[in-house]
Image: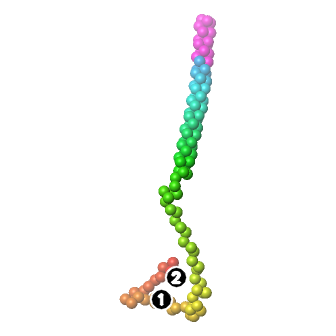
Amino acid sequence: MERLVQNELLHYENSGLRDALTAKKQRKNAAAAKLLKEQEKEERRVARERAKEASTITQRGKRKASKAPLAKRKPKRAKGGAAAHPSSLEAAPAPPPKVSSRGRAITLSRKLR
């Protein structure tokens, strides 16, 4: 009877050790797979960069006539102040009427006030 109990205990111990080993192997395999995946990702990134660099090198050799012309900047004009209009020394014109020709009230928006 004692042998059966010891056998049972050894059986449970062995199964626990087996489970621990399989878990350890799975973690190791997962880490290796992750590392491999990262290396492949890095290789793809480097290949993309090389292809991009190669295309830019070939683009540099093209004639400038084949490129679209850049929009030219228009020269800025001087803002007109009092110096631009000598008549501004006179009184300002009268404000617009508050009633339209049809007799309706006119309300100016805040933007125009």
Residue at 57%, 29% in the rendered image = 33
Residue 35, picture quadrant: top right
Q: Is residue 32 visible?
A: yes
Q: Which residues are magenta?
A: 1-17
Q: Residues within 10 Å of mark 2 (few under 14, many from 20)?
A: few
Amino acid type at image mark 1: Pro
Residue 76 place in picture, x, y as percent: 57, 74
Q: Quadrant of the N terminus?
A: top right
SS assignment at label 2: loop
Q: Seen in the image, is 58 located left or right of residue 106?
A: right
Could you tell me how many numbered marks the image carries? 2
Label of residue 113 in the image: 2
Q: In the picture shown, does residue 43 fall above or below 98?
A: above
- As measured in the structure, the alpha-carbon distance from the residue carrying label 1 to the one carrying label 2 is 11 Å
Secondary structure, mark 1, is loop
Whether residue 5 appears in this view of the structure is: no
Q: Residue at x 58, y 91 (%)?
A: 86
Q: Is residue 10 magenta?
A: yes
Q: Is residue 40 magenta?
A: no
Mark 2 belongs to which amino acid? Arg
Instruction: Give the percent coordinates (x, y) of residue 94.
Output: 51, 92
Give the camera-side residue of 87 and 68.
Answer: 68
Residue 19's label in the rendered image is none
Q: Which residue reaches farthest bottom?
A: 90
Question: Label 1 belongs to which residue?
Answer: 96
Q: Earlier in the sequence, mark 1 or mark 2?
A: 1
Residue drawn at (53%, 48%), measured in percent from left and top? 58
